[in-house]
Image (cartoon, helix red, strand yellow):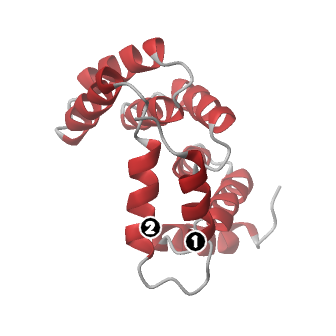
Amino acid sequence: MRADQARVEGLLQELRSPELPNWQMVEAEIWAEWSRSGSAAMDLLLQRGRDALEADDIATAIAHFTALTDHAPDFAEGFNARATAYFRAGLFGPALADIQRALVLNPQHFGAMIGLGSILEEVGRTGDALAAFRAAAAIHPHEPDLKDAIERLEKATGGVTL
């Protein structure tokens, strides 16, 4: 079953609510929806890639995610997952390309935005990283790591986005 876009939109709206004590549950539901490609075989490739990533087998994760993106080029989560694997391998160029593709396919993908901010911060583009983290926080204001990243980068840049 493919992700239910109306359900995702409702969940994203709920996630933006300032008072949301169960935000982790809403976030988990969003990730679950985003992880549905519409194909059992593609969902299995995603899961195998995630399992390999969790086992720190980055090469196998990249192989699974590459098969996924080759066979499901309109599935944003495949590109986001491979971007994570590329990032963990230190391959920032391919990671950025996959993040870009994920965001074209799913402009509200706060995970991809967080990944973008992390790469930009890693390469010293703190103003751009801050902008990416702020964009993610506009969608997911409850993520504590985002709050920390924004505070850290605001101090580093004086709060100015370059």
Q: Quadrant of residue 38?
A: top left
**What residue is shown with label 1?**
14
Q: Where is residue 121 in the image (x, y as percent from the top left)?
A: 59, 51
Residue sitting at 55 percent across and 44 percent down? Answer: 119
Q: Quadrant of residue 23?
A: bottom left
* 35 sits left or right of 59 in the view: right
* 40 sits left or right of 66 in the view: left
* 67 sits left or right of 127 in the view: left
**Number of callouts:** 2
Check the image and report above or below for 151 versus 46.
below
Determine whether label 2 and label 1 are within 8 Å by CB.
Answer: yes
Residue sitting at 24 percent across and 21 percent down? Answer: 60
Type of amino acid at the residue the image marks with label 2: Val
**What residue is shown with label 2?**
26
The residue lying toward the viewer, choosing from 7 and 125, is 7
Query: Which callout, 2 or 1, points at the residue further toward the start of the chain?
Result: 1
Q: Residues within 10 Å of mark 1 (few under 14, many from 20)?
A: some
Q: Position of residue 146 (x, y in %)?
A: 54, 67
Type of amino acid at the residue the image marks with label 1: Glu
